[in-house]
C-alpha cells in the first residue's frame, strides 16, 4: 500500500510524469487499435470471434524478426509481414474457418482457440521461447529535463500504424470490395441476393484481418518484444476494445484503443508492471458487465 501511495504521490508531485504515461499509452494503444479493427471486421462480417487474433500479431512479429536476421531492412518487414500473413490467413480460412461460419458460437470459439494453440506451439518450435526484438538503432528524444523520453522507433511505429489504418479506411470506403464487405456485414442474405459473392468476401475479410495483425506484429517487434505465447495478451486487449467500441465503429475502436493503452500505463505505474495483464482482464470484465446492463435497459416489455 505504501508503494501505491508513493506512486500516486509521484504523479501529483511531478505532473510531467502524467505526460510520459499518456504518450506511452497512446503509442501502444495505437497498435492495440490496429489489431482490434481486424477483429471487428471478422466479428461483424462473419460473426466469428477469433481467439487467435493475438497469435496472428505475434506471427507477424516473428516474420519481420526472421527477415531482419536475413538482412532485410526492418521497416521493409512491415509490408512483407502484411503479405505473408495475408497468405496464411487465406489458408487458415480455407482449411478451417469456412467450415465454422454457419455453426454456433461455441464451434467457432473452439476452432479459433485450436488455431491459437497450434500457432503458438509452431512458433515455439521454430524460433524458441526466448523473447525477441529488432533493434532499429534509433536514438531517443528527451523532453522536460529528461522526465519524458520518446524513442524515435516508437514514433515511427505509430506513424506506420496510422498510415496502415488510413489505407484500410480508404479501401473500405471507396473500393468495390470494401463496399461489398460493408454490405455483407449489414445483411449477408441481402448481399447474396444483390449478386455479391459472400464466400469471396469472407475469405478476403479474414485474410485482410490476418494481414493487418501481421503488420501490427512487425511494428511491435521493432518497439517492444515478442514471444510465442504472448498472443493472449493482444487477443484480450482486442476483445476489450471491440466490445467497448462496438462492431463497425472505427472511431470508437481508435478511441478505445488509445484509452485502454493509457489506462494500462497508469495501472502499471501505480500498482506495478506485474499487474498490467490483470488490468486488461479487469477492463474486459467491466466492459462485459456494462454491456450486459446496457442491453437489459434497452429491452422493452411487449404488451
Image: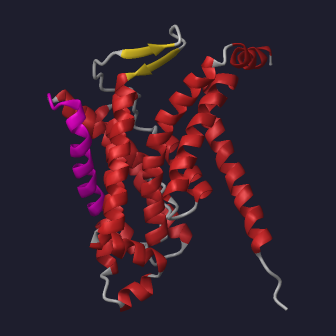
Determine if residue 250 is in view: yes
| For residue 22, above or below residue 197 | above
Where residue 148 appears, as percent x and y from the top left, is 52, 17
Determine if residue 124 is in view: no
Q: Is residue 131 left or right of residue 232?
A: left
Q: Which residue is nearer to you in this view: 83 or 151?
A: 151
Where residue 216 appears, as percent x and y from the top left, is 37, 43
Q: Is residue 21 left or right of residue 80?
A: right
Q: Which residue is nearer to you in this view: 295 or 68?
A: 295
Q: Residue at x 46, y 37 (%)?
A: 230
| For residue 37, above or below residue 258 | below
The image quadrant where one finds the N terminus is: top right
Q: Which residues are magenta?
A: 71-93
Q: Residue at x 73, y 57 (%)?
A: 290
Q: Is residue 264 magenta?
A: no
Where residue 89 appears, as percent x and y from the top left, is 30, 58
The image quadrant where one finds the C terminus is: bottom right
Q: Is residue 135 left or right of residue 109?
A: left
Where residue 159 appears, as percent x and y from the top left, is 35, 37
Amino acid at each position: 500500500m505504501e508503494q501505491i501511495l508513493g506512486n500516486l504521490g509521484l504523479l501529483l508531485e511531478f505532473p510531467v510524469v502524467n505526460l510520459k504515461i499518456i504518450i506511452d499509452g497512446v503509442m501502444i494503444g495505437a497498435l492495440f487499435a490496429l489489431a482490434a479493427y481486424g477483429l471487428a471486421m471478422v466479428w461483424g462480417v462473419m460473426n466469428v470471434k477469433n481467439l487467435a487474433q493475438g497469435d496472428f500479431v505475434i506471427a507477424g512479429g516473428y516474420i519481420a524478426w526472421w527477415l531482419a536476421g536475413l538482412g532485410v531492412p526492418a521497416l521493409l518487414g512491415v509490408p512483407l509481414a502484411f503479405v505473408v500473413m495475408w497468405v496464411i490467413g487465406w489458408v487458415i480460412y480455407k482449411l478451417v474457418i469456412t467450415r465454422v461460419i454457419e455453426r454456433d458460437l461455441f464451434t467457432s470459439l473452439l476452432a479459433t482457440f485450436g488455431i491459437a494453440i497450434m500457432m503458438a506451439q509452431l512458433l515455439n518450435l521454430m524460433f524458441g521461447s526466448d523473447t525477441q526484438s529488432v533493434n532499429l538503432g534509433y536514438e531517443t528524444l528527451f523532453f522536460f529535463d529528461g522526465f519524458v523520453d520518446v524513442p524515435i522507433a516508437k514514433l515511427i511505429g505509430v506513424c506506420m500504424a496510422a498510415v496502415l489504418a488510413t489505407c484500410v479506411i480508404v479501401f473500405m470506403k471507396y473500393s468495390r470490395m470494401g463496399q461489398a464487405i460493408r454490405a455483407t456485414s449489414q445483411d449477408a442474405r441481402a448481399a447474396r441476393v444483390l449478386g455479391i459473392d459472400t464466400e469471396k468476401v469472407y475469405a478476403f475479410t479474414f485474410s485482410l484481418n490476418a494481414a493487418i495483425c501481421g503488420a501490427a506484429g512487425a511494428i511491435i517487434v521493432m518497439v517492444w518484444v515478442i514471444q510465442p505465447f504472448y498472443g493472449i495478451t493482444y487477443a484480450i486487449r482486442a476483445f476489450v476494445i471491440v466490445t467497448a467500441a462496438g462492431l463497425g465503429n472505427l472511431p470508437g475502436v481508435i478511441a478505445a484503443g488509445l484509452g485502454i493503452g493509457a489506462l494500462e500505463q497508469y495501472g502499471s505505474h501505480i500498482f506495478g508492471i506485474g499487474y498490467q495483464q490483470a488490468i486488461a482482464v479487469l477492463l474486459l470484465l467491466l466492459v462485459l458487465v456494462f454491456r450486459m446492463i446496457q442491453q437489459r435497459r434497452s429491452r422493452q416489455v411487449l404488451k
